[in-house]
Each structure stands twice: as structure tokens, then as C-alpha cells.
Image: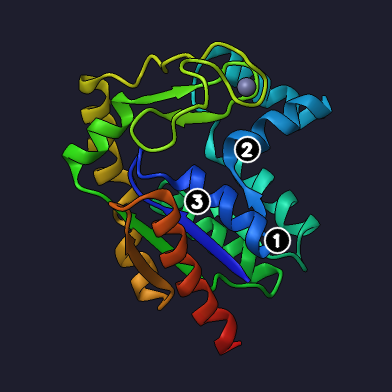
Amino acid sequence: MRILLFGPPGVGKGTQADLLSKKYNFIKFSIGDILREEVSLNSNLGNKVESYLNRGVLVPNNIIFELVKLFLGKNKEAHILFDGFPRTLDQAKNLEKSLAQLGLSLDVALEMHLAEDEIIKRLLNRRYCPKCNRIYNYATTPPKINGVCDQCRTKLEKRSDDDANTIRKRLQVYEEKTHPLVDYYKSLSVYNQTDAISSPEEVFDKISKIIDGYINKE
Ligand SMILES: [Zn+2]
């Protein structure tokens, strides 16, 4: 099974992706992780990626597409969860092409919904661990000890782009670039959606039911 999770920043994709991966044995495709992994391999491609990351510019699509291909080639038989990827219509179309070349397809593209003021509230409460990259949220998933990572005891930090103005801009970018995926995936008959307003556990239950529905159909 291949599932894709998308939704605005702060909707809780990462948390759900982790929970779902554990429950259904999905291999997670998260572009940030994939980029970091390739850099650590010291491959040709990894060195290119590193030069973009070091300059703080977006890694261009041709490199991303190559990484997607490599990943799919290695994980043909696996259950895959795409976490927050694709972000644009171009990326979505390329993913579809790469899947088709391997005789594969996407089973469900699941959109997570949340009202804008709720997203802003959540993002303002978000903290991350600079050492192990774990994300916390003082509103929904706080650390056990205030301000400290549960896993590695590092002091939590706030991302510099988690302030109200930047958040509004990021939501605008999402609306323009990523939201068109809704119509695209509807046209492929793989679109589904869920509300993300309740607790992470409740959202997890809702998404699990949707996935179970697809598994039972197979
Ligand atoms: Zn940590």
C-alpha cells in the first residue's frame, strides 16, 4: 500500500506519519530525511544536495526527482507513506510518473484539514529538539519536562519561521502551491480527507479507519 499525507504546516502530519509507520509498517518518505541521508552517504548526489543546503536554497526538482526514483526502486515491495511530499503539482505529477514506470500506483492521498487560526495557534506553540529533530507542541504534545527533549534531554528551541507573520506567509504558499493537489488527486480517484482538529490520538484513529478501509478492499 502506498499512502500520501498532505496538509498545511502545523496540521500534525509528522506526528501522524510516525504513528502510522509504526502501526502499518510503512517505510516513510520524508524529503528532509531523504536529503540528510543522501548527504551522509557522501554520494555524488549527496554532495550536490549539501551544496544547496549549505547555501540555504531549495534543492531543485531534478535532484528531488532523482532521489524519489532511487527510493522507489529500493522500496518497490514496501508499504510506503509519503510524509508532506509532494508539495507542488509538478512534484505530484513526477511522482505519479515514477510510480507508473515501476508498475506501481498510489492508493490514497489523504488531506489533513485544520482552520487557519488553529494552525497559527499550534505553530506558535511548536518547539523542536536541535539534536534529534523531535517535534513537540505545548498545546498538543508537550515534553514530559518543560523545555527539555524527552529522548535526549537537549534544550528545546523554537524554529525561527514559527512566528505569526512567517506562518501566514507559509500558509499562503501552501494554498497556492500545495492545495492544487486536491483536484489533481481527485482526478486520479485517490483523494480522501480527514479533519485534524481533535487530539493526535483521535486523528490517528480516524486515519487508521480510512487505511483499514483500503486494506480490506484489497
Ligand atoms: Zn532530542
Residue that appears at 50% across and 43% down: 14
Name the N-terminal-most of marks 3 and 1: 3
Q: Residue at x 22, y 40 (%)?
A: 118
Q: Identify the amino acid type marked 3.
A: Gln
Circle on res. 63? 2
Looking at marks 1 and 2 on the same chain, the residue that comes earlier in the sequence is marked by 1
Q: Is 121 on the left or on the right of 18, as rendered?
A: left
Disc on res. 25: 1
Q: Work out which quarter of the rendered image holds the N terminus and state it.
A: bottom right
Question: Which amino acid, mark 1?
Answer: Asn
Q: Position of residue 120 (x, y in %)?
A: 23, 32
Q: Is residue 84 visible?
A: no
Left or right: where does residue 205 sit relative to residue 101? left
Residue at figure coordinates x 54%, y 51% from the top left: 17
For residue 62, side relative to residue 167 (left or right) = right
Q: Are marks 2 and 3 in contact (CB under 8 Å)?
A: no
Q: Which mark is residue 16?
A: 3
**Kind of residue at disc 2:** Ile
Q: Percent from the top left, x then y, of residue 152? A: 67, 20
Q: Which quadrant would residue 32 be assigned to in this image? A: top right
Q: Residues within 10 Å of mark 3 (few under 14, many from 20)?
A: many
How far apart marks 3 and 1 lie (CA) works out to 13 Å
